[in-house]
Amino acid sequence: MNPPLGKGKDVQTQAGNSPKILDYVLEQDYLTKSGNNQYKLGGISIAVSLNQVYSDKVMDKAGKTYDVEKTLNVSQVKQEGKNICPKNSAKNSQGQRAQPSAGFHDAIYGGAA
């Protein structure tokens, strides 16, 4: 969900021009007992953590590493989070469609937002 390297003369510039906004996604599936040793999906919770400062180490083709740090625009980060959550809400991490009867909750987290 993060962008590929951007344009630039070197890998450090390329990484800085396409910062990774998405930090991680955490999914929790909740099961409910529906019979004798039978369970069904009772709910899904997805937490999306977003970077407000993009910090990374990138490596060029020669094997040299470079630090990249870029403060991100808070409005852009929030908008990207809103764009990411609907993509996660349709399917769980195994690619299965969420059952319509299952409860669904998503949350977006960002550093100082």
Image: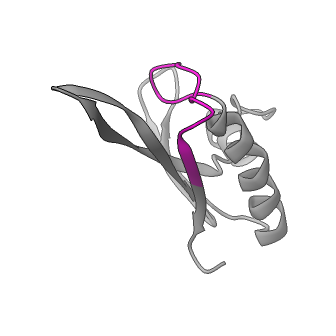
* Residue at (58, 37) in percent of width and height: 101
Where is residue 10? Give x, y as percent.
68, 33
Magenta stretch bounds: 91-105
Where is residue 65? Give x, y as percent.
44, 39
- Residue 7's place in the image compared with 79, above or below, is above
**Residue 38 in view in this figure:** yes
Quarter of the view holding residue 87: top right
Is 94 contained in the magenta span? yes
Where is residue 57? Give x, y as percent.
46, 45
- Residue 91's place in the image compared with 79, above or below, is above
Residue found at the far front of this picture:
35
Q: Is residue 92 left or right of residue 85?
A: left
Residue found at the far bottom of this picture:
112
Look at the magenta stretch and give its main secondary structure: loop
* Residue at (51, 20) in percent of width and height: 61
- Residue 35's place in the image compared with 49, above or below, is above
Q: Is residue 2 left or right of residue 42?
A: right
* Residue at (66, 31) in percent of width and height: 90
